[in-house]
Image (cartoon, rainbow, N blue to C red):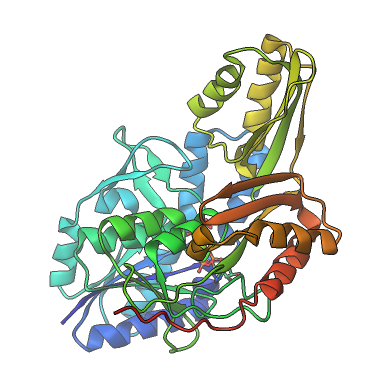
Amino acid sequence: MALIVQKFGGTSVADPDKIKAVALRVMELSKQGNQMVVVLSAMAGETNRLVDLAHKMQAIPDQREMDVLLSIGEQATVALFAMAVKEAGLDAVSLLGDQVKISTDSMHTKARIKSINADLIKRHLNDGKIVVVAGFQGVSESGDITTLGRGGSDTTAVALAAALAADQCEIFTDVEGVYTTDPNICPSARKIDRITYDEMLELASLGAKVLDIRSVGLAKRYKVPIHVRSTFTNTQGTWVVEEDKIMESMLVSGVTYNKNEARITFSRVPDTPGIASRIFNPISDAGIVVDMIIQNTRAGDMTDMTFTVPKSDYERAMKIMQKIAEDIGAESVTGDTKIAKVSIVGVGMRNHSGIATTMFHILSRENINIMMISTSEIKISCVIEEKYTELAVRALHDAFELDKANLPLEES
Ligand code: ADP
Ligand code: ASP
Ligand code: MG
């Protein structure tokens, strides 16, 4: 008998028939004697619908109330799923984040899990029930409902797998695993059989939303192997695991894109000590995570500063920045939400030169202008106009021949 955690994403539970089909799939394993913990997302599109509703009430929605609202998507699916199981003849119980006690900090809309109490789940499992936990939500110390950030149900699943010392953690989604790039925009994308936590962390941080980055971080820390696979087939998916000797070692392992960032530019800021901290302190105090930052070379006593923030925090960031611009005497502050960040990722880049040049060449060949560049040892990112995202991803995937499998490196 194994304890298995399975998470099903929004497209997997998008309507009543799909919920019933997933329930039957889970029940099969339960009938074979396994203890089943199921984590569910809201139905596809539901969280977006709730976000839109909130914006109809308040230009910048109150973060606490936003979490009360967003948590209802998952509340609906877990209840429906438990009903489907009962109707089909087994017992199930749905649990919300505060019932389980998934304790988080109080950073609304992007809370971090601090601890999980596994007792209630274990009691229900020992009573023979399938336990259905609402993904993406928790409860803060003050008793307020919190959510874990978009895509956060993956994190709920991995955290539960760690807390319960589960034998298996499976993330079911609408594609067959982790690919060299998004298979929905690049037909030649290739499924990766095994990938290390570190490479997956890098892909996820740069936009491969097939796994939420925080779920990968937790999996690495608690050594939880993750199996990412399709809800709609029975084929093996991708294993996200620790590095071992026979893994693929690729120059470039994937191409990612992220359309969820916006760019903010300060023009003509006085170039004096302390300016960067006066700009970025209030942003971090507001819990907004800045990604790329570029400061231009000095022109007279002035300089320009450009950075990116999550699109969901853009309005709040702009409001803060307009005030700062006045305080520090910047000429103007402008924003652009129609951008995308396209990245190539691969540990093999460490020892190779020329990868960045190839990337720039491919983008210029497609007539795509690069607005910002950032590099690290194992990735190169370029910010471009959003409308060229798909073109850029396909061109880069082709140029680095990611459709062709690498030979495994046999190490003795
Ligand atoms: P779920 O609702 O199941 O959590 P998501 O939409 O969050 O599913 O994630 C699955 C989607 O991730 C896929 O449909 C695919 O479009 C996208 N995706 C982006 N990059 C990748 C990648 N490298 N490999 C697989 N899927 C990817
Ligand atoms: N429903 C949430 C979202 O759409 C969480 C999740 O699906 O993982 O972001
Ligand atoms: Mg997801």
Seen at 42% across and 71% down, the residue is: 195
**Residue at position x 33%, y 61% from top?**
158
The mark total stands at 0
Q: Quadrant of residue 275?
A: top right
Q: Residue furthest right?
A: 367
- Residue 94, given in percent of the width and then of the height, sits at 32, 64
Q: Position of residue 150 (x, y in %)?
A: 51, 52
The residue depicted at 70 percent of the width and 39 percent of the height is 263
Q: Position of residue 122 (x, y in %)?
A: 16, 64
Apparent side of residue 368 relative to residue 88 in the rendered image (left or right): right
Residue 200: give x, y in percent of width and height: 45, 63
In the rendered view, tell whether residue 13 sits above or below residue 355: below
Nearer the observer, 225 or 141: 225
Q: Residue at x 20, y 62 (%)?
A: 164
Is 320 above or below relative to 261? above
Q: Is residue 89 visible?
A: no
Q: Is residue 184 left or right of residue 217?
A: right
* Residue 197 as seen in the image, left or right of residue 370: left
Where on the picture, by quarter, is residue 255? Answer: bottom right
392 relative to 109 in the view: left or right? right
Q: Classify the position of the C terminus by image quarter.
A: bottom left
Residue 142, by quadrant, is top left
Front residue (pair 120, 324): 324
- Whether residue 346 is visible: yes
Q: Is residue 99 above or below residue 272?
A: below
Quarter of the image that includes the N terminus: bottom left
The residue closer to the viewer here, 175 or 252, is 252
